[in-house]
C-alpha cells in the first residue's frame, strides 16, 4: 500500500535520466512545481530541446553515472533501457525519492494521473495496476469541475485567512471553517457576485461574534 502525499519541491534538486517523450513530461511537471531540474542523457528529443531552450532546466550530454544524482532530492529514471534504469535505482541513497517509469513496484514513489486548475488539484492512482484507468477517471473528473469551482476555492482561501486572523482558535472556529465547505454555502457563493460574497463572509463573522 502506498502513502498518498503532495510534495513541496520548490527549489529542490531533481534529476531526470532520459531525453525522450516520457522524460519530457516528467521534466515539465517538475519545472511547473518549482524544482531545479537537471537532465542526464547522451541525446535528447526535439521536444526536450524546446523545453531546454524555454526554461531554467539544465542538460548534461552524457551517459548516466552514479555521481549524477549524488545531491538530488528526487530522481526519475525515464530511459528506454532497463539496464540504465536499474543502475539509477541502485545508485540512489536510501533517503532519495526515486521513480522508475518502467517499474512502479521498484519505485519509492509513483506519479498519479492528475489535473490541476489553480488551487484545485485532483490525483488518481490504481497503484500501478492500470494507469489507463487512472487517466480515464481523471478525464471524467475534469468534466465535473469548471471555473466556478476554481473561483469558489479561491474565495475559501480568502475566508480561511480572514477567519484565522479574526477569530481565536476554538471549536467554534473549526465549525465555521467546515460550514464554508458545505454544499449549501458553496451554492450561495457560486450564485453570488464578488460583492455579495464579501457580504456572506461578513455576515458569518458577525453571527459568530453575536453568539459569543
Image: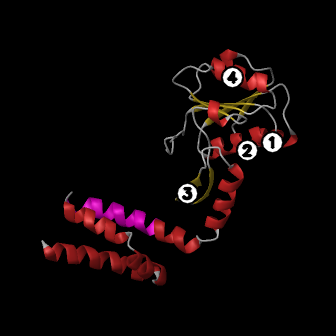
Reading the image, the residue beneath label 2 is 25
Of the image marks 3 and 4, the number of the one nearer the N terminus: 4
Residue 62 pos. (x, y %): 80, 21
Rendered residue at 69%/22% (across/down): 88
* Contact flag, marks 1 and 3 (Cβ < 8 Å): no
Reading the image, the residue beneath label 1 is 21
Residue sticking out furthest to the left = 212
* Contact flag, marks 4 and 2 (Cβ < 8 Å): no
Residue 42 pos. (x, y %): 84, 25
Q: CA distance from mark 4 to mark 2?
A: 19 Å
Q: CA distance from mark 3 to mark 4?
A: 30 Å
Reading the image, the residue beneath label 3 is 121
Rendered residue at 65%/36% (across/down): 104
* Contact flag, marks 1 and 2 (Cβ < 8 Å): yes
Q: Is residue 192 magenta?
A: no
Q: How many marks?
A: 4
Q: CA distance from mark 2 to mark 3?
A: 17 Å
Quadrant of the rendered structure where residue 77 is? top right
Of the image marks 1 and 3, the number of the one nearer the N terminus: 1
Count neighbours of disc 3 (C-alpha within 10 A) and say few if under 14, some if 14 to 19, many if 20 or more: few
Task: Decide which of 60, 134 is in the foreground and name it.
Answer: 134
Q: Is residue 157 magenta?
A: yes
* Contact flag, marks 1 and 4 (Cβ < 8 Å): no
Relative to 9, 16 lies left or right: right
What range of the chain is rendered magenta?
154-168
Of the image marks 2 and 3, the number of the one nearer the N terminus: 2
In the picture, the disc for residue 88 is 4
Which quadrant does the C terminus fall into?
bottom left
Count neighbours of disc 4 (C-alpha within 10 A) and say few if under 14, some if 14 to 19, many if 20 or more: many
Rendered residue at 56%/60% (across/down): 118
Q: CA distance from mark 1 to mark 4?
A: 19 Å
Of the image marks 1 and 4, the number of the one nearer the N terminus: 1
Amino acid at each position: 500500500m502506498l502513502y498518498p502525499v503532495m510534495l513541496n519541491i520548490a527549489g529542490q534538486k531533481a534529476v531526470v535520466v532520459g531525453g525522450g517523450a516520457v522524460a519530457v513530461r516528467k521534466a515539465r511537471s517538475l519545472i511547473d512545481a518549482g524544482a531545479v531540474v537537471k537532465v542526464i542523457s547522451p541525446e535528447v528529443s526535439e521536444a526536450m530541446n524546446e523545453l531546454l531552450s524555454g526554461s531554467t532546466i539544465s542538460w548534461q550530454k552524457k551517459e548516466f553515472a552514479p555521481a549524477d544524482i549524488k545531491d538530488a532530492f528526487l530522481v526519475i529514471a525515464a530511459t528506454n533501457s532497463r539496464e540504465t534504469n536499474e543502475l539509477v535505482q541502485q545508485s540512489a541513497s536510501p533517503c532519495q525519492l526515486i521513480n522508475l517509469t518502467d517499474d512502479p513496484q521498484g519505485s519509492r514513489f509513483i506519479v498519479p494521473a492528475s489535473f490541476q486548475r489553480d488551487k484545485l488539484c485532483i490525483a488518481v492512482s490504481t497503484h500501478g495496476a492500470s494507469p489507463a484507468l487512472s487517466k480515464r477517471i481523471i478525464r471524467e473528473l475534469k468534466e465535473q469541475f469548471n471555473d466556478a469551482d476554481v473561483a469558489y476555492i479561491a474565495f475559501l482561501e480568502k475566508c480561511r485567512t480572514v477567519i484565522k486572523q479574526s477569530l481565536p482558535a476554538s471549536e467554534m472556529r473549526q465549525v465555521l471553517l467546515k460550514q464554508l465547505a458545505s454544499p449549501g454555502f458553496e451554492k450561495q457563493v457560486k450564485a453570488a457576485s464578488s460583492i455579495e460574497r464579501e457580504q456572506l463572509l461578513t455576515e458569518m463573522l458577525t453571527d459568530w461574534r453575536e453568539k459569543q
